[in-house]
Amino acid sequence: MPVPSLCDDDRDALLSAHPLWRLRGDGKAIERTLKFADFNAAFGFMTRVALHADKVDHHPEWCNVYNRVEITLTTHDAGGLSARDAQMAAFIDAAAIAGGAG
């Protein structure tokens, strides 16, 4: 079943509420880069996000190199951004603060 995509106003509200995220060039995803104290802190953050993502069945695209985590959020079923991405961005922002991201 398709997931509704965000309208332009909702997308703008998402970016306003989460200013550390940037809109990908094609407008279909948001991206954020986080830096942690070390690999253990980065991996701990990723573990918290992974457990939540599995619970809500919405998984980020990401890459980890030592203390850096790059995350992309998009909803493939919506062909772009959806409310799921807004909810995941909020969770990730909170987890980043708890995990000591700088």
Image (spheres, rainbow, N blue to C red):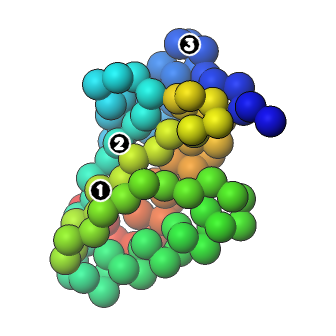
Q: Amino acid at mark 1?
A: Glu
The earlier-in-sequence mark between 2 and 3 is 3
Q: Is residue 90 left or right of residue 20?
A: right
Query: Residue 31: which disc?
Result: 2
- Residue at 57%, 39% in the rendered image: 75
Residue 6 location in percent, x, y?
A: 61, 22
Quarter assignment of residue 59: bottom right
Q: Is residue 22 left or right of residue 77?
A: left
Q: Does any portion of residue 13 appear in the rendered image?
A: no
Q: Is residue 77 left or right of residue 38?
A: right
Q: Report which residue position mark 3 lands on.
A: 9
Q: Amino acid at mark 2?
A: Glu
Residue lying farthest to the top in this orientation:
8
Question: What is the C-alpha distance between the residues marked 3 and 1?
Answer: 25 Å
Residue 98 locus on image (x, y percent): 45, 70
The location of residue 54, given as percent across then percent down, is 65, 67
Residue 85 visible in the shown view: yes
Task: Please name whichever residue, 88 or 96, is drawn nearer the observer in this view of the structure.
Answer: 88
| Residue 4 sits above or below residue 92 on the image | above
Q: Are marks 3 and 1 in contact (CB under 8 Å)?
A: no
Q: Dot 2: what SS?
A: strand
State how far apart marks 2 and 1 are (Cα): 7 Å
- Residue under label 1, please give it: 70
- Sequence-wise, which precedes: disc 2 or disc 1? 2
Local SS, label 3 = helix
Q: Are marks 2 and 1 in contact (CB under 8 Å)?
A: yes
